[in-house]
Image (spheres, rainbow, N blue to C red):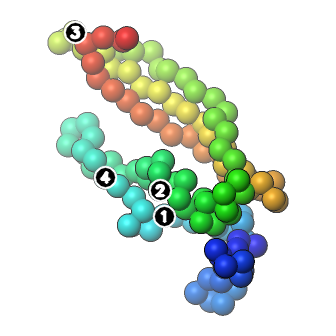
Amino acid sequence: FVLNADGSILIDHNGKPVTVERFLCTKPLRAEVSTRKGPGGMKLTYMGGDMVTKTLNEAFGYNGWCLEVKNTSREEPIKDEKGRYHVAYIATVRVTHQRSGVFREDCGAGDSIDRSLA
């Protein structure tokens, strides 16, 4: 089970203990996510690395979890009519709870537009 900072078991709103598996599958609270403008004025929602670290440290304690980048790849850059390169990267990461060995693996992507690939 997931422990509170005081060492007690984390309990959900139904009075049931929260398992590590269930905790790793929950969605973040609105206060834990940020937004930014994306392509075409689209609103992008993300959780910053500092908030991910804070949340995992609170739940599992310092050194109670491990982040592993399993794979990264760059998609083929595309040059537009203005001479700018559009490039995207994809990463697969795994977060592991050290004590139980339970993990969650997922992928994410990022993109950029620039005149240079350097």
Residue with the mark numbered 4 = 35
Horizontally, residue 52 falls left or right of residue 111, namely right
Looking at the rendered structure, the secondary structure element under dot 4 is strand
In the image, what residue type sits under mark 2? Met
- What is the C-alpha distance between the residues marked 4 and 3? 29 Å
Q: Residues within 10 Å of mark 2 (few under 14, many from 20)?
A: some
Identify residue for label 2.
Answer: 51
- Residue identifier under label 3: 83
Res. 80 visible in picture: no
The x and y percentages for residue 22 are 67, 68
User: Mark 1 and 2 residues: CB-CB less than 8 Å, in contact?
Assistant: yes
Please report the residue visible at 28 percent of the width from the left and 47 percent of the height from the top.
36
Secondary structure beneath dot 2 equals helix
Spatial distance from mark 1 to mark 4, Cα to Cα?
Answer: 13 Å
Spot the residue most to the right. Answer: 100
Mark earlier in primary sequence (1, 2): 1
- Could you tell me the amino acid type at mark 1? Pro
CA gap, disc 1 and disc 2: 10 Å
Three-letter residue code for mark 4 = Thr
Distance of label 2 from label 3 (alpha carbons): 36 Å
Mark 1: few/some/many CA within 10 Å (<14, 14-19, 20+): some
